[in-house]
Amino acid sequence: MAKQLDYHTLREIFTRFQAAEPEPKGELEHVNAYTLVVAVALSAQATDAGVNKATRALFKVADTPQKMLDLGEERLIEHIKTIGLYRNKAKNVIKLSKILVEDYGGEVPNSRAALQSLPGVGRKTANVVLNMWWKQPAQAVDTHIFRVGNRSGIAPGKDVDAVERAIEDNIPADFQQHAHHWLILHGRYHCKARKPMCGSCIIRDLCMYEDKNL
């Protein structure tokens, strides 16, 4: 695990990320807060591209909790059977839709605790929804962020909770809103697991990774 980078280095790293991509966006397609919750819940152990392919047709017929309940579990499965763990995910989507209708008037709650009380919604999913829909500086740590945070020294930590805290504690506030998207995109397209593209990396001179592939 790399040591935590200092404030001035972090400012320079995120200034570069911002210059390269001023408004980074999540890659999961959605039309409202509800479809975002469903898409993120479906994306566990699946790719965003695979989820988008399955949900394009689904969200045309079921873009509210009530419409999802009307669709039913079996027809939902038909839409999402190309996604891993689809049976369990379908059960959770139907359950969370029922809770949203019965307890929240069909609206998606915007507190982390309320979101995490929904079946199939963990802290990471809640943070994605809070960040992408309600513009909260919540940090959803996935495998890409965990890898980049530890490799580079941007946000080192033994587990995802520690990396989440390191981002919140150390990255300057003016970069917090987009921090997790910049880190995800950097991990997905540049700082890859097996063959990091250090030669073309915009922060290679600031990163603490010792095995740079230059």
Image: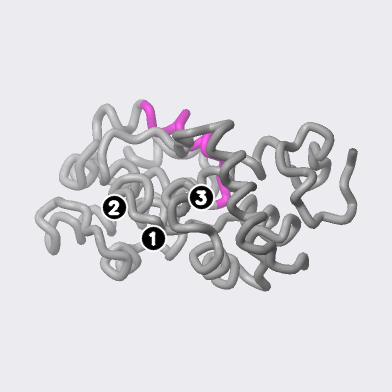
Q: Is residue 116 above or below residue 203?
A: below
Question: Along the polypeptide, which appears first: circle 1 or circle 3?
Answer: 1
Looking at the image, residue 68 sits to the left or right of residue 19; the answer is left
- Percent x, y for residue 108? 22, 53
The reply to whether the magenta stretch includes residue 214 is no
**Quadrant where the C terminus lies?**
top right
Q: CA–CA distance between discs 1 and 3?
A: 21 Å
Question: Along the polypeptide, which appears first: circle 1 or circle 2?
Answer: 2
| Badge 3 amino acid | Ala
Residue depth check, mark 3 versus mark 2: number of the one nearer the observer: 3
Instruction: Read off the magenta span.
Output: 45-56
Q: Is residue 115 above or below residue 159?
A: above
> Residue at 45% across / 32% down in the picture?
52
Residue 151 tag number:
none
- Percent x, y for residue 161? 54, 71
> Residue at 61% across / 39% down in the picture?
16
Please name whichever residue, 49 or 13, is drawn nearer the observer in this view of the structure: 13
- Percent x, y for residue 49? 53, 32
> Residue at 82% across / 45% down in the picture?
194
Which residue, given by chain and number where applicable, does mark 2 sit on?
Answer: 94
Residue depth check, mark 1 versus mark 2: number of the one nearer the observer: 1
Which residue, given by chain and number where applicable, does mark 3 sit on?
Answer: 179
Residue depth check, mark 1 versus mark 3: number of the one nearer the observer: 3
| Badge 2 amino acid | Ile
Residue 121 tag number:
1
- Percent x, y for residue 44? 51, 52
